[in-house]
Image (tube, rainbow, N blue to C red):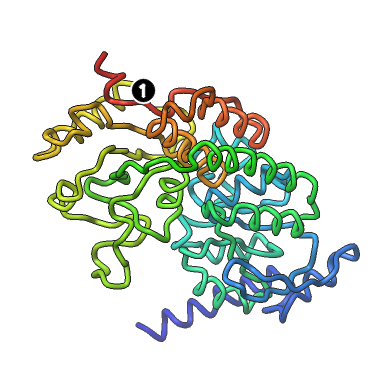
Amino acid sequence: MRSEANGQRRRTLLSLAALLGGGALPGLSMAQTDRNTTSLAAIRDDLDREVVLSLPLRRVVVFNRYTTEFVRAIGAMPAVVGVDIDAAKHRAYWPTVTQAMWAGSGQTAPNFEAIVAMRPDAVFMPRNSDWKQAERVLAGFGIPVVVVTAWDLLKHEWNVELLGRLFARPQPAAELNAFYRRWRDELRRRLEGAARPRVYFEEVGDHKTVLKGSGWHDMIEAGGGLNIFGDVDILGQPKARGSVQNFEVDPEQVLARRPDVLIKLQPGQYEPHTRAFSKGVLERLAKRPGLAALPAVRDGQVFHISYYLAGGCSKITGALQIAQWLHPQRMKGIDPQAVMGQWLETFQGVPAQTGYAVSLAELRT
């Protein structure tokens, strides 16, 4: 049975090689022979790996929505020939994406046959993806894997500048970085010297939080908060408890760490959730055993934020919203959802939306 499976895999790979012109291609020979206007260049990616590419890139497969947003923000979306399921299923947000561009179910489940058939110059994957397997599989077809982690708030400028070089779009990249820097620097100025309220930030699943090393943790910190589980070292934890992006905690530990604020993140969708949905989410959170007695719940410091507002522009819009909740006096005159609207209209080319964030106190009035 194993021999039969191996034979089928070999036949599949040979057929894919035929799509590329007669076999696995060494290095970047396809890019060199097909495009007279490109030139080879060695770049360093997010993990400081040296990757040789034929620039500018003309055909790319992109995993992870944050990176696809950056590519679109600098005007390079025509080069995208493949995306993961997030872009493939949200048609309102990705009107130019078709089902034929679906390159896998996610960054840990790429469809290699589909990717090879798309003949990309490169595949982009974040560092928390299965990029190592992708590199092993795609190397035989002359398709380089570039690690780009666009969800990393702290590396926004580096990531955008890199993409600007890869697509020969330096000016749009500079404009995007200027937008990011404006709000990052405004946050730093307004929050300088402010006390940091203790924040319990819960992912979509119950009792799932975030640790240091995740973009969500950095978003909380940038917004003037203190992540109550930011001291947990993932290396000392059982793998079954999850990752830095989605870590399971004991309910008793939430109570013991006595957060000043509870923030619930809900599934990502371009269209904002209804107020009824948000109220149900927050009411269930507030009614958990023990939480009702916390001052945070009694004082109405319980909030719901949509993944899209939280994640906009490497999460800088999420940091603005958190700062507004935690430090309302210092954030007077700043409307995070208006900033989000600019991100959507100016850099993503889609209509602005509102209603991405709400407090339990608002919903009860």
Residue 50 lies, with reference to residue 147, above or below; the image says: below
In the image, residue 81 lies at what x, y percent? 66, 52
Decide which of 130, 196 is in the foreground and name it.
Answer: 196
| Left or right side of 312 for 234 | left
Decide which of 108, 26 is in the foreground and name it.
Answer: 108
| Left or right side of 228 for 59 | right
Screen quadrant of the N terminus? bottom left
Screen quadrant of the C terminus? top left
In the image, residue 62 lies at what x, y percent? 60, 55
In the image, residue 305 lies at what x, y percent? 38, 34
Which residue lies under the disc numbered 1? 274
Extreme-left residue of the structure: 289
Secondary structure under the numbered disc 1 in the rendered image: loop
Q: Please tell me which residue is depicted at 46% across the width and 63% down the height of the picture.
A: 128
Extreme-bottom residue of the structure: 3
Decide which of 2, 333 is in the foreground and name it.
Answer: 333
Q: Please tell me which residue is depicted at 68% across the width and 68% down the height of the picture.
A: 19
Binning the other alpha carbons within 10 Å of mark 1 as few (below 14), some (14 to 19) or many (20 upward) gives: few
